[in-house]
Image (cartoon, helix red, strand yellow):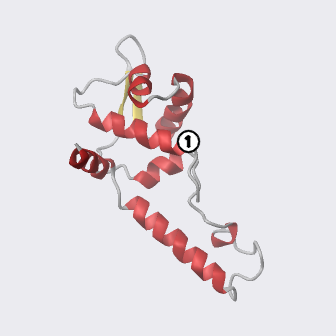
């Protein structure tokens, strides 16, 4: 598993929204500037976050983005999945019949265990947890 910039930037942008305690939507250009991400690239990412129901967007002069759920409800796995990231180490883990040896291949068990651990780990981390981690680093 290797995350692309899309997944990493999505996580950073979502964390930026979590930091916004004003209650007002955060404009795309503000998020982009704070996180040093291209506005155009971030726009595509935030469209994916909105499609996944993770953010709400408001158009207009005072528009922008807000979290659509509480920080406790949004897991890192949700963000990465919405950004089209794959956490699957090898195809045979989730696609039966891929190699024909799934039931007898010891490596399939190893890769499946790795996949389960990655999935559980990313599901165990919420945006609230990320905020706590960030505050501990200050």
x, y percent for residue 54: 41, 41
Q: Residues within 10 Å of mark 1 (few under 14, many from 20)?
A: few
Residue located at (55% from left, 41% from top): 6
x, y percent for residue 18: 30, 38
Reading the image, the residue beneath label 1 is 5
Q: Is residue 58 left or right of residue 106?
A: left
x, y percent for residue 44: 56, 31
Count the marks. Answer: 1
Q: Is residue 67 visible?
A: no
Residue located at (49% from left, 44% from top): 8
Residue located at (58% from left, 46% from top): 4
SS at mark 1 in the image: helix
**Image height check: is 46 above or below 85?**
above
Q: Is residue 22 visible?
A: yes
**Image height check: is 10 above or below 38?**
below
Which quarter of the figure is the N terminus placed in?
A: bottom right
**Image height check: is 24 above or below 83?**
above
Q: Is residue 16 left or right of residue 45?
A: left
Q: Quadrant of residue 22?
A: top left
Residue occupying the far top of the picture: 61
Q: Is residue 101 left or right of residue 61?
A: right
């Amino acid at each position: 598993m290797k995350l692309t910039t899309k997944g990493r930037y999505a996580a950073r942008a979502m964390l930026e929204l979590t930091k916004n305690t004003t209650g007002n939507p955060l404009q795309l250009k503000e998020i982009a500037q704070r996180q040093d991400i291209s506005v155009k690239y971030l726009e595509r990412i935030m469209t994916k976050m909105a499609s996944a129901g993770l953010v709400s967007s408001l158009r207009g002069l005072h528009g922008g983005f807000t979290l659509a759920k509480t920080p406790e409800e949004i897991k890192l796995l949700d963000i990465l999945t919405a950004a089209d990231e794959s956490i699957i180490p090898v195809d045979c883990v989730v696609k039966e019949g891929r190699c024909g040896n799934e039931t007898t291949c010891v490596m399939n068990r190893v890769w499946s265990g790795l996949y389960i651990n990655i999935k559980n780990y990313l599901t165990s981390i919420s945006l609230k947890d990320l905020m706590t981690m960030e505050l501990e680093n200050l």
